[in-house]
Image (cartoon, rainbow, N blue to C red):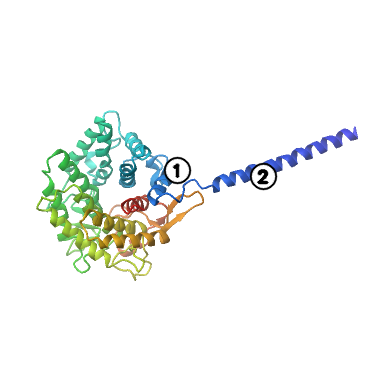
Amino acid sequence: MIKAVFKKINFIKVVIVLLLIFGSKIKAQGQNDSDKTIISDQLKWSERTALTVLRNYPNAWQLDGNDKPKWDYKMGFVLSGFEKLFQKTNDKKYLNYIKNYVDERIDSSGSIKKYDLKEYNIDYLSPAKLLFNLYEVTKDSRYLKLLGQFRNQLESQPRTASGGFWHKQIYPNQMWIDGLYMAEPFYAQFTMKYEKGKSLDDIAKQFELVQNYIIDKQTGLIYQAWDESKEIGWANKLTGTSPTIWGRGIGWYMLALTETLDYFPKSHPKYKVLVAYLNQIAKNANEYKSPEGLWYQVADKPQLFGNYVEPSASAMLIYAFAKGANRGYLASSYKRTAQKSFDSFIKEFVKVNKAGEVNILNVSSNVGLGGKPFRDGTNEYYLTAKTKENGAIGIGAFLLSAIELDK
């Protein structure tokens, strides 16, 4: 009886020891798997970034921490980089990532789910740019129908007294600088492709209004918004502009110009005017970069307490400088500036984990004006906006800059 008990105890001891040994091996194996490099550092920064996005956000609508699908300019911005990467590499996984995002948001008849024209949200036009290439590749008529729907939105989009597009129905008489990026490249591509360029003068007019009313006369930089009626609480009572010169706002404006010029014929009388606008803002922005070649959240006040260099603004300007130089809109010296700034960006904002995934640090969250609770647009408001890792605009801007610089 006693021997039987001892045998049983010894057997249990052996089982425990074996479980401990195998458990530690399994744990060690798991640790090794998590530490294993998945994305090679021999790839270009553009591909490493795109592969990171594919791993961490299987569905593009998950970008920026979203918990449900939506048609959104932030997703559109990142996916515009994927489109360029597909065109560069012909790798179908980049195209499929875009297609899956768009197809999830449209129904069988070719309408966007939960899209309400009456909102007149100009942000909706930015992801619509993805539809041009999708239609060319697939010939799916839903994409063409949807392009027409968004063009029709512009046709009835409310305007200021001077003819500028309102940013949204809920923001009467207001042009926002990011709205130029959301609308004009789409508008230019559509009118050249399907309307024989009939709307080019109207597109140029949007930029002319920016130059006349939203550019700061002292610095040559640009405010985020302008209320032509001067009635909203954040508006300067003399000029109608919002209070802060926002780094990302400069980026949006330069991207709006470079991407619109891609479709603007050189023979058009306003082509040289738009190129001049780009050169003007590029020259002025270049004077406000940090010693390392990066740009600030509040762009014109580097010494302001609490101010900081911000990745989305910096990568946008790097991309605009590089693209402008590559296309001949800007002098070649801007590409050299972009290359130096890109290297500084890597040191300041990029963290690569053991799996080889690319993470962008300290991206400013979205900022806006008006609304409830009321956003007053002061310097302090921009400087106290939360930052986060891998904000979609930061990822998208870095991806685009890496593609343009062939990094």
Percent position (x, y) of residue 294? 34, 63
Residue found 31% across the figure and 47% down from its top: 77
Q: For the residue labelled by badge 2, is the local secondary structure a helix, a strand or a loop?
A: helix
Percent position (x, y) of residue 82? 34, 44
Distance CA(mark 2)–CA(mark 1): 28 Å
Q: Using the image as rendered, state which of residue 390 and residue 346 is in the foreground.
A: 346
The amino acid on which the numbered mark 1 sits, given as a three-letter code, is Arg
Q: Is residue 191 above or below residue 42?
A: above
Q: Is 159 left, or right, of 119 in this rendering? A: left
* Residue 32 appears in the rendering: yes
The amino acid on which the numbered mark 2 sits, given as a three-letter code, is Ser
Q: Is residue 92 above or below residue 123?
A: above
Residue under label 1: 55
Percent position (x, y) of residue 55? 45, 43
Q: Which of the marked residues, 2 or 1, is nearer the chain's N terminus?
A: 2
- The disc at residue 24 is 2
Pointer 1: residues within 10 angstroms few (<14), some, or many (20+)? Answer: few
* Total numbered circles: 2
Residue found 78% across the figure and 40% down from its top: 13
Q: For the residue labelled by badge 1, is the local secondary structure a helix, a strand or a loop?
A: helix
Callout 2–callout 1 Cβ contact below 8 Å: no
